[in-house]
Amino acid sequence: MTPDLELIHKPIHESFRAWAHGFPHTVAKWHFHPEYELHFIITSNGKFFIGDHIGSYGAGNLILTGPNLPHNWVSELPEGVVLPERDLVLQFSSDFIERCALLFPEMAPLKSLLGEAARGLQFPDALGLRLVPLMKELTTAQGLRRVELFTRLFGELCDCRERRPLASVSYLAQAGRYMSSTINLVLAYIKQNITLDFCEQDVADVAEMNTLKFTRFFRKHTGTSFIQYVNQERIALACELLMNTDMKVTDICYRTGFNNLSNFNRQFLAHKQMSPSKFRSCLLMNMPEPSGDGHS
């Protein structure tokens, strides 16, 4: 079965992504991505799939996967049961690690560990349970505290001698063979061109389909229409720019691929239930005011 490409949206002002999700979830499927992933299971039992490896898991399951290594965790639950928080996930790029290693030679053990992660690495559940509080804090931490928690986590992993590889030596995690999947080509094209002006026919041409066939194909694989998906991705980018830059709303409109301000405002309101200006002003309300005399 061909894994799906997951498009990971890292906040502009952060070096890596740390987050939590429940089960079922849109990313809880057989998928891959170019980023490394450290994955904790908080609760539930089930089967996990890493490359050509299949194993059983419980609370404390802790696995590190390398770039483009397909993976999935399937909980064994009664029908209709939903877990609000099952997974803690840390994702980061190889470029981030390479840049850090140039500045800090002390990161050599981490580079060695990540080399082993090409096949997937499993750590003892006891270590996973001990590290869960650190990972939970990392999902909400800000500033230098995030960097401190990141290095503490990977310091523990580097020191662990009980880690074991999962996928077989002969298993080749090559993105090329997955990217040939039509839906993955389509999603990659959208991600690469999200700031540009393109239409459904342009993407249908990439998929080598007529527009009618592509419309049905896209909804089948994503659960939404092409226009809704593109607008959702563009609004997500707009939110990042509103939160982390001083760009004017008009500039953000065109920077995110919208070709007129009225449509941008309409789509933003539909997705966020407020205007872009209101969104930014609400963020400012949530920021601490600077102290004039240095006293709180």
Image (cartoon, rainbow, N blue to C red):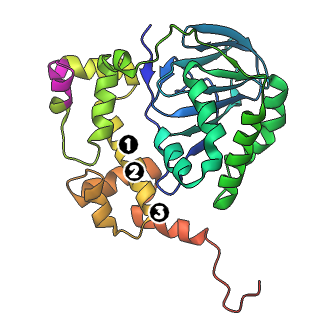
Residue 232 sits above or below residue 211 on the image: below
The residue drawn where x is 70% and y is 21% is 122
Q: Spatial distance from mark 1 to mark 3, Cα to Cα?
A: 17 Å
Q: Earlier in the sequence, mark 1 or mark 3?
A: 1
Residue 54 left/right relative to 68: right
Task: Say what secondary structure mark 1 lies in.
Answer: helix
Q: Are marks 1 and 2 in contact (CB under 8 Å)?
A: yes
The span picked out in magenta is 203-212
Q: Is residue 1 found left or right of 116 in the rendered image?
A: left
Residue 136 x %, y %: 74, 43
Q: Residue 204 lies in magenta, yes or no? A: yes
**Residue 76 visible within the image:** no
123 falls in the magenta region: no
| Quarter the C terminus occupies | bottom right
Q: Residues within 10 Å of mark 2 (few under 14, many from 20)?
A: many
Residue 41 position in % (x across, y down)? 72, 26
Q: Nearer the viewer, mark 1 or mark 3?
A: 3
Residue farthest along the bottom direction in this orientation: 293
The label number, if any, that marks residue 210 in the structure image? none
Q: Quadrant of residue 220?
A: top left
Q: Nearer the viewer, residue 142 or 69?
A: 69
User: Observer-nearest residue: 174 or 247?
Assistant: 174
Q: Is residue 67 left or right of residue 209?
A: right
Residue beneath disc 2:
237
Identify the amino acid type marked 2: Leu
Residue drawn 29% across the image and 25% down it: 185
Q: Which mark is residue 244?
A: 3
